[in-house]
Image: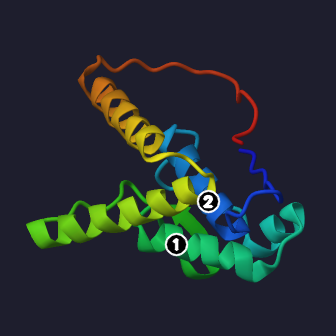
Amino acid sequence: MRIRLDHTTPVPPFEQIRAQLALHVAAGRLTAGDRLPAIRTLANELDVSTNTIARAYRELINAGIAEAAGRRGTRITAAPPVAHNVAQRSEQIEAAADRFALTASELSVTTDEALEAIIVAIRRRNDRRSAPSYTVHVAEAGSLT
């Protein structure tokens, strides 16, 4: 697993780290039970404050992607929690949309480009759900940027 920070973007380092870890989970490179690097270790590797890593981990925990296991570190959960009522689902999707809108704005993406990216991502996820499941083992293909 590799994480890279882009110091030329207005996206804060904690958000870059959070997003890349979430992508590793979505891509299956991090799975339920996997332990995230110790905060101090990752902070040293990325040359950022331990507070930056702690905030990224807190965001993952708040999203249900990870859980704090005390002295055993932070681990990936089985799956993000599913909202059981309409109000909760609405709040979660609104929060996700706000995060996406902020990132799109910081990247100077047009509304049409942002909407197209969302449509493509949703279709891609739906296609994966309906496709037959196969186990494929591949070597790590590099870093996320």
Instruction: Decide: few, some or many residues near mark 1? Use Cα within 10 Å; few <14, some 14-19, many ≥20.
Output: some
Q: Considering the numbered disc 1 on the image, is that residue within a helix, a strand or a loop?
A: helix
From the image, which quarter does the C terminus lie in?
top right
**Residue that numbered label 2 is attached to:** 106
**Amino acid at dot 1:** Glu
Instruction: Decide: few, some or many residues near mark 2? Use Cα within 10 Å; few <14, some 14-19, many ≥20.
Output: few
- Residue 35, horizontal then vertical, whole percent: 61, 60
- Residue 50, horizontal then vertical, whole percent: 78, 79
Report the side of 136 relative to 5 (left or right).
Answer: left
Above/below status of 103 relative to 126 = below
Front position in the image: 110 or 48: 110
Label 1 – label 2 distance at C-alpha: 19 Å
At 32% from the left and 36% from the top, the residue drawn is: 122
Task: Evaluate whether residue 124 shows in this view.
Answer: yes
Report the side of 49 relative to 87 (left or right).
Answer: right
Q: Considering the numbered disc 2 on the image, is that residue within a helix, a strand or a loop?
A: helix
Sequence-wise, the earlier of marks 1 and 2 is 1
**Amino acid at dot 2:** Glu
**Residue that numbered label 1 is attached to:** 59
Above/below status of 33 relative to 125 = below
Location of residue 85 by image quarter:
bottom left
- Residue 6, horizontal then vertical, whole percent: 79, 54
